[in-house]
Image (spheres, rainbow, N blue to C red):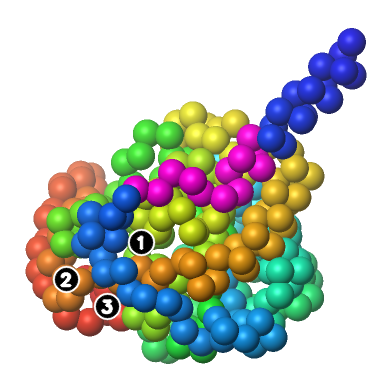
Amino acid sequence: MRWARQRIEAAGRWMRLAAGIVGTAAIAGAAALYGAEPGGESRGGAGDKKERKIYILTDLEGASGVYKFAQTREPGPLNEQAKEYLMGDIAAVVRGLRAGGAGEILVLDGHGSQAFVPHLMEPGAKYITGLPRPGHPLWGLDESFAGLVIVGQHAMMGVADGVLCHTQSSRSENRYWYNGVESGELAQAAALAGHYGVPPILVTGDEAACREARQFFGEHCVTVAVKRGISREAAVLYPFEETRKALEEGAKQAMKMIGLAKPYRLQTPIQAKKEYLLFEGPEKKPRRVVKEGVIEDVLKLLEF
């Protein structure tokens, strides 16, 4: 009876993962609601399957098996292990994209302290890591890419069920609003890509991050949840065999969204607001600071 019960439980987990592969909870008129322009069809290889270039942006907090800041902030065994978890997720996504018809794939290490493990790089893609990098934050991205893929993402700061949720800095608890709408790293990355007409076609991370992606990007952005948040540092984790299978299938399905998914564009000039903690004095007592201003150039979004 035990083995039968275990098989049923495993099947149930896979069904939940499979159900999350394609986002179906799009909000009607989401582009207008979130201060974004519809943007039109994506450019750069969308019409020629052989030339479809895909840009992958990664982060560490949303990878399979990662659920506490000790895995993401400081060097050590937990951090090294978490990096390996991320590389496994990336590998599954690269395989799925290739199976779906992707040509050139460029993968950018988006984690602040960098998280790539070179000997675990999946063939069929090129990988960018190390700091500083010249130019805009998504180095190498231009109009020639057909889709943006965001792997290992987390929800914005303040989301109750968001595993390791934050926006840019988890220590100073940054929060950002663009045109009156609070936005996290998902929207920031997609807005940068939107400048080049590149649409988000796949987002992977915890269920809260996937929910956020569907709200901002709509039903044609595929989402794959690899865990479910209980609190900021507690989660229901799914077995890697199941998450990697779902990630590969989700990436394959995401290639079918090219031509359907729309770029995410912020209306300019952008009315921007930022809140963050400033630590002052010998006791480093936190004080919340509010900054407001106008951003004229989307590519300077993260300089605000």
Instruction: Provide residue 258's location: percent of width, then percent of height.
Output: 54, 71
Residue bearing the label numbered 2: 270
- Label 1, label 2: how far apart the Cα atoms are: 13 Å
C-alpha separation, residue under disc 3 versus residue under disc 2: 8 Å
Residue of label 1: 187
Is residue 153 toward the left or the right of residue 238 in the image?
left
Q: State which quarter of the image contains the C terminus.
A: bottom left
Q: Residues within 10 Å of mark 3 (few under 14, many from 20)?
A: many
Q: Residues within 10 Å of mark 1 (few under 14, many from 20)?
A: many
Question: How many badges with numbers are in the image?
Answer: 3
Which structural element holds mark 1?
helix
Q: Which residues are magenta?
A: 16-27
**In which image quadrant can residue 217 be found?**
bottom left
The residue under the point 34% across, 80% down is 195
Q: Is residue 137 left or right of residue 221?
A: left
Q: Position of residue 271 (x, y in %)?
A: 12, 67
Label 3 close to label 2 by CB (< 8 Å): yes
* Residue drawn 16% across the image and 62% down it: 179
Residue type highlighted by circle 3: Val
Q: Quadrant of the N terminus?
A: top right
Q: Secondary structure at mark 3?
A: helix
Specify whether residue 163 is in view. Answer: yes
The local crowd at label 2, few if under 14, some if 14 to 19, many if 20 or more residues have their Cα within 10 Å, is some
User: What's the CA distance linking mark 3 and mark 1?
Assistant: 12 Å
Label pair 1/2, CB-CB below 8 angstroms = no
Residue type, mark 2 in image: Ile
Q: Secondary structure at mark 2?
A: strand
Give the amino acid at mark 1: Ala
Q: Which mark is residue 298?
A: 3
